[in-house]
């Protein structure tokens, strides 16, 4: 019997190998929280991209009407208008609108509505800002005009100083605006 070995308890505890169910659940919880954070970040990036696109479109349209006014300085007063763009009916053909200023305002109104780009081959206009509007206002200074482009933003921010489009959007805090001053020089020589 001396050849038979006895199995005795080892003085060291036996270690289990592998992972326990609790460790797996904690790992899954951490992974789920991380994925939710990533999804929220993606949503914020999309919103920022849309806001940036709209601001870029507004700046292009602001420069467009400013350039048109500067090309027709002798008739700059004829560009003064209430908000145009969304909610305003345009003629189908702007060339029949009348004066150069009326034609320019008609074309600008169509651009504010996004007529340059349509959605999915339909007639739905999608090439401009959300509810884009434009205003040209005479200021208290002679021969100085305030040109504004406003639109509906996504997130709330500070209320723009321009009165253009005021009260036309969900909230004044979501109204966005870009403005420019057009100064008509006195060319009379006096």
Image (cartoon, rainbow, N blue to C red):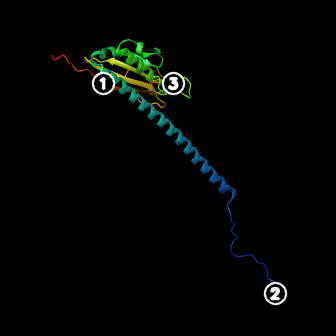
Circle 2/circle 1 CB separation < 8 Å: no
Q: Nearer the viewer, residue 5 or 40?
A: 40
Residue at x 46%, y 29% (from the top left corner): 153
Which numbered disc, 2 or 1, marks the residue closer to the eye?
A: 1
Classed neighbour count for the residue bearing mark 3: other residues with Cα under 10 Å, few (<14), some (14–19), many (≥20): some
Residue corresponding to mark 2: 3
Classed neighbour count for the residue bearing mark 1: other residues with Cα under 10 Å, few (<14), some (14–19), many (≥20): some
Image position of 12 (left or right of 121): right
Q: CA distance from mark 2 to mark 1?
A: 106 Å
Circle 3/circle 2 CB separation < 8 Å: no
Percent across and percent down for residue 150 are: 42, 24
Residue 80 appears in the figure: no
Which residue reaches farthest right?
1
> Which corner quadrant of the image does residue 95 belong to?
top left
Q: CA distance from mark 1 to mark 3?
A: 29 Å
Relative to 46, is 160 above or below? above
Q: How many marks?
A: 3
Circle number at residue 181: 1
Circle number at residue 125: 3
Relative to 150, is 92 above or below? above
Q: Nearer the viewer, residue 59 or 121?
A: 121
Relative to 95, is 33 above or below? below
SS type, badge 1: strand
Image position of 37 (left or right of 24): left
Which numbered disc, 1 or 3, marks the residue closer to the eye?
A: 3
């Amino acid at each position: 019997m001396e050849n038979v070995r006895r199995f005795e308890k080892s003085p060291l505890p036996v270690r289990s190998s592998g992972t326990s169910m609790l460790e797996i659940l904690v790992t899954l919880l951490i992974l789920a929280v991380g994925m939710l954070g990533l999804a929220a970040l993606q949503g914020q990036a999309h919103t920022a991209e849309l806001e940036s696109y709209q601001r870029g479109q507004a700046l292009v349209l602001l420069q467009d009407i400013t350039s048109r006014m500067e090309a027709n300085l002798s008739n700059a007063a004829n560009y003064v208008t209430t908000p145009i763009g969304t909610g305003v009916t345009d003629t189908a053909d702007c060339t029949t609108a009348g004066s150069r200023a009326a034609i320019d305002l008609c074309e600008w109104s169509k651009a504010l509505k996004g007529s340059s780009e349509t959605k999915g081959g339909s007639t739905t206009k999608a090439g401009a800002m959300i509810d884009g509007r434009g205003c040209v206002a005479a200021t208290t200074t002679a021969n100085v005009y305030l040109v504004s482009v406003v639109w509906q933003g996504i997130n709330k921010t500070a209320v723009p100083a321009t009165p253009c489009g005021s009260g036309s959007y969900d909230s004044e805090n979501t109204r966005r605006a870009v403005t420019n001053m057009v100064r008509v020089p006195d060319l009379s020589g006096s």
